[in-house]
Image (spheres, rainbow, N blue to C red):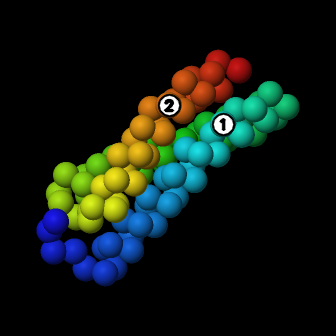
Amino acid sequence: MAQVTKAKHDEIDRLLDLSQAGWEELTEIAEEAGSWDRESLEAYLAERPLEEDRLRRLSEHAQAGRMDEAQLERHRRLLDLAEERRPLLERLHSV
C-alpha cells in the first residue's frame, strides 16, 4: 500500500460508506418506485451517475495502492453488489 495520510484513508472510508449505502438502497427504491410520480423517479435517476462516479474514484484509489487490505475487500464486495443491482437500475429506467 502506498503511503496514505489519515485524511486520505478517512476519505476512502467515507466514499466506501456512501457508495455501499447507495447501492444497498437500490432494492428498496426499486420496490417503491412504482408508486412515485414521474418527476421523483427522474430526479432519483438523474443522481445515480454519482454512484458510478464514486465507484470509479474508489477504483482509482485501489489501483493507485491507496487502500489498505480491509478497504480493498470492501471495494471488491461493493463492485459485486453494484454488478448485482445494476439490473434494478435498468428496470427503473424502463418504468
Judge from the rendering whether residue 87 lies leftward or rightward of residue 26; answer left or right: left
Give the amino acid at mark 1: Thr
> Is 39 placed above or below 87 here?
below
Total residue callouts: 2
What whole-number distance in Å separates the C-alpha atoms at marks 2 and 1? Answer: 10 Å
Write down the residue under mark 1. 27
Rendering coords of residue 9 (x, y %): 32, 72
Image spot of residue 25 (x, y percent): 64, 45
Q: Give the residue pinned by disc 2.
A: 84
State whether residue 93 appears in this view.
Answer: no
Is 68 placed above or below 49 here?
below
Direction from residue 22 to residue 80 in the image, left or right: left
Residue furthest to the top in view is 94
Is 22 in front, or is 71? Answer: 71
Q: Which label's residue is closer to the chain start, 2 or 1? A: 1
- Residue 83 visible in image: yes
The residue at 34%/53% (across/down) is 73
